Amino acid sequence: MTLLLLLAFFGLSTGFLFLLHLTPRTLLQELTHLLTHAQPRKHSISKLIHAVQRPKKLKGWRATISEAKAILRQTGQSGKLGLLTVSSLGLSIIGAVLAFLLRNMWLIPVLAAGFALIPFWIVLFTSTFYKKRLHSELETALSIITTSYLRSENILAAVEENVLYLNPPVSDVFQAFLAESKLIHANLRLAFEQLKGRIHDSVFQEWCDALIACQEDRTLKTTLMPIVAKLSDMRVVSAELDYLLYEPLKEFITMALLMLGNIPLLYFLNRDWFITLTTSTPGQIILALCGGTLFISFASVIRLTKPLEYKR
């Protein structure tokens, strides 16, 4: 009966789309555009001042969503925010439908919330590889540009002669810096401030601050190489701790497989216990608690696998 109701719902939804001359792709694009360009709620001036003076630290699912959105902005993929939200909504519906098919009402909010956060967790996890590649490219770029600058004492010439040997995303940032310095204005301090905001890395921003100081006092150029050396130190430490960083993820996958594998295994070992677990109210509550624990543990593991970053 449940399956028939679901089929009737999907059939009715499809019929409405045909009557309105809409395709699923058009509907997805409209939802993405609506969510991307949604106007934020306006707050009073007193609330804005209070938020600036006493910023409230986000926790839980709000922190996950905020961090995922910040990563998309930093990587130049802000246009995917709407698609990410639509994917989260779709997966939430799939999770609720799956729990409904399993006839476990306690599992509906757990699967709906857990499936809704999966796209944001994927963004956080894949950002680890992006940050590692960024650190590697930054180490190469800052090293060769700094060496050229120490020789010529001309930062524009140093960037121009080495930008061809750089790889994205670092090469795009320095090409924009050259275009701004040569074609738009000759204010190097302003150009460095713009360059500083294009890559969210503490060592890179410290390097930009040192270059700004070098434009006023050339004797400060000796501070550049120790700053670049911090990236090398980070790479060495990260290589030594890579195994330890991914150890929690391996343990989580092992324990999750054991927990999920025990449920069908129980069907073959003792069918009465399996029926009690899946049909009785206490058994369904236990399954919901296990599902919630699984999602919370996965969120914690994602945060533990972040790459090392240098903090000033």
Image: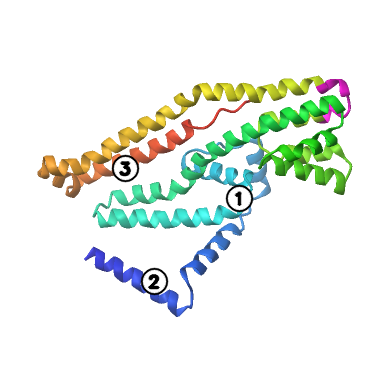
Q: Position of residue 57 (x, y in %)?
A: 55, 36
The crowding category of the residue bearing disc 2, from other C-alpha atoms within 10 Å (few below 14, some 14 to 19, many at least 20), is few
Which residue is disc 2 drawn over? 13
Question: Residue 45, relative to residue 229: is it above or below?
Answer: below
Q: Tag 1, which secondary structure?
A: loop
Label 3 belongs to which residue?
291
| Sequence-wise first label, 3 or 2 | 2
User: Gap in Å between the C-alphas at discs 3 and 2?
Assistant: 30 Å
Tag 1: amino acid: Gln
Residue at the image point whose x is 78% and y is 42% from the top: 177
Give the residue drawn at x 81%, y 43%.
178
**Image quarter of the N terminus:** bottom left
What is the magenta segment's predominant secondary structure? helix
Q: Secondary structure at mark 2?
A: helix
In front here: 226 or 9?
226
Residue at x 54% of width, y 37% of height: 129
Q: Amino acid at mark 2?
A: Ser
Residue 81 shows up from this direction: yes
Left or right, 309 with reference to 288: right
Tell me how far mark 2 sits from mark 1, CA to CA.
Answer: 31 Å
Q: Which residue is mark 1?
A: 77
Q: Position of residue 284 (x, y in %)?
A: 23, 46
Q: Report how far apart the C-alphas of labels 1 and 3 lie in the structure.
A: 32 Å
Mark nearest the camera among 1 and 3 is: 1
Graded by Cα atoms within 10 Å as few (under 14), some (14 to 19) or many (20 or more), the crowding at tag 3 reads some
Q: In the image, which disc is placed on residue 94?
A: none
Magenta stretch in the rendered image: 212-221
